[in-house]
């Protein structure tokens, strides 16, 4: 589903990834009461979910020392204060699955965005993924009942990491979808655009380049499907396949986007041609694909995960 959505719009794919794969799967760690209040309406589309780990000074590093959003224990729940950043769906979401520092540990909470003390900032202005709204969320002494804890107190980081592993499979699928869209648009252009009396597709350079890209897209699709199958088999962390799929699929989309703009030439650089209002989607994908190499674990982190599978954590750290 995510691949097909990203084929047409990476913004929509990212919205669904956060809503279903991140927020939705995280809610599975909650009690039946949480599933009834949040998961069922999320699946029916009556409520929109968001998922928050990133902060102004914490993203790749989700350690207790780096994070500044704290949940202070009370008799009947928690008091939450802090700030999260780049939170997808936040401007339109009903609730957020929130990772907080809880003493020397971390706890995952469900916080409704209309509760007293919660404020969502203005949507960010990004170079791409314009349809995917992101914003800061501010928490000022927000009261959260114990019934809104996911799993057990102190298990928040484990829940967040397990959920993000699933998200990486989703982002791998979105990278594959963008790459497939670039391929299809490029093939059509190479066949129809002519130079020096023949179709550009008749130049061997582009024949070989497209043969390589077709093979790489097949590899990207097989990688994310293998990771998804391993998850379906019961693996909590389907690694290193999830990391391989995320890095490979999104890196492919980024590299291919440069080629696709080149294939379209000046037309590929236009958001809209003034002469006739025409638009070619490769420029949109060129802008959208970069974020896929960053969110839900940078591609550098994916390589570290792969290296740990090869050498072991004792060597890689």
Image (cartoon, rainbow, N blue to C red):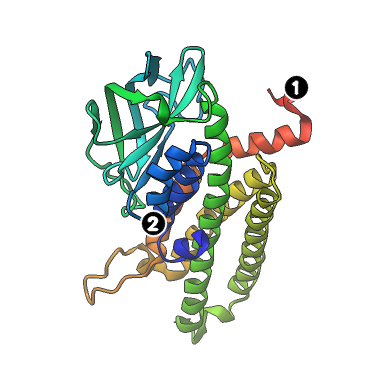
Query: Residue sitting at 61 percent across and 63 percent down?
Result: 217
Q: Write down the quadrant of residue 281 in the picture.
A: bottom left
Query: Residue sitting at 65 percent across and 40 percent down?
Result: 236
On the question of residue 290 being in view, the answer is no
- Helix, strand or loop status at disc 2: helix
| Quadrant for the C terminus in the image | top right
Task: Estimate the x, y position of residue 272 in percent, counting from the top left.
Answer: 27, 67
- Helix, strand or loop status at disc 1: helix
Query: Residue sitting at 48 percent across and 24 percent down?
Result: 107
Exactly how many numbered labels are in the figure? 2
| Residue 169 located left or right of residue 313 | left
Nearest the viewer among 110 and 308 is 110
In the picture as drawn, the residue positioned furthest to the bottom comes out as 197
On the question of residue 112 being in view, the answer is yes
Label ID, residue 314: 1
Q: Earlier in the sequence, mark 1 or mark 2?
A: 2
Task: Estimate the x, y position of residue 142 in percent, counting from the top left.
Answer: 29, 23
Q: CA distance from mark 1 to mark 2?
A: 45 Å
Nearest the viewer among 142 and 87 is 142
Nearest the viewer among 91 and 78 is 78
Up the image or down, 175 lies above or below 70; here it is below
Task: Estimate the x, y position of residue 212 in percent, counting from the top left.
Answer: 65, 65
Query: Residue sitting at 69 percent across and 46 percent down?
Result: 234
Q: Residues within 10 Å of mark 1 (few under 14, many from 20)?
A: few
Q: Residues within 10 Å of mark 2 (few under 14, many from 20)?
A: few
| Residue 102 located left or right of residue 226 | left
Task: Estimate the x, y position of residue 120 in percent, counting from the top left.
Answer: 25, 35
Label ID, residue 44: 2
Up the image or down, 286 lies above or below 77; here it is below
């Amino acid at each position: 589903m995510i691949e097909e959505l990203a084929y047409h719009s990476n913004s929509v794919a990212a919205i669904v990834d956060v809503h279903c794969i991140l927020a939705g799967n995280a809610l599975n760690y909650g009690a039946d009461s949480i599933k009834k209040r949040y998961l069922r309406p999320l699946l029916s589309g009556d409520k929109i979910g968001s998922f928050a780990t990133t902060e102004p000074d914490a993203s790749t590093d989700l350690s207790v020392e780096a994070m500044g959003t704290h949940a202070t224990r009370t008799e009947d729940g928690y008091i939450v204060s802090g700030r999260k950043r780049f939170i997808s769906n936040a401007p339109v979401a009903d609730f957020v699955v929130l990772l907080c520092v809880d003493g020397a540990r971390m706890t995952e909470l469900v916080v409704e965005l209309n509760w007293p003390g919660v404020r969502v900032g203005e949507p960010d202005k990004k170079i791409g993924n314009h349809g995917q709204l992101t914003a800061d969320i501010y928490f000022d002494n927000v009261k959260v009942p114990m019934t809104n804890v996911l799993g057990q107190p102190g298990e928040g980081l484990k829940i967040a990491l397990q959920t993000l592993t699933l998200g990486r499979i989703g982002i791998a699928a979105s990278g594959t979808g963008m790459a497939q869209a670039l391929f299809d648009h490029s093939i059509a252009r190479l066949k129809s655009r002519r130079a020096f009396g023949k179709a550009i597709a008749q130049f061997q350079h582009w024949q070989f380049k497209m043969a390589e890209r077709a093979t790489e897209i097949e590899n990207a699709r097989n990688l994310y499907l293998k990771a998804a199958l391993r998850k379906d088999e019961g693996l909590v962390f389907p690694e290193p396949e999830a990391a391989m799929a995320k890095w490979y699929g999104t890196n492919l989309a980024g590299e291919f986007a440069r080629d696709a703009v080149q294939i379209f030439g000046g037309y590929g650089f236009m958001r809209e041609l003034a002469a006739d209002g025409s638009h070619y989607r490769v420029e949109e994908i060129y802008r959208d694909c970069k974020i896929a190499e960053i969110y839900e674990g940078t591609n550098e982190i994916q390589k570290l995960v792969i290296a740990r599978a090869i050498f072991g954590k004792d060597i890689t750290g």
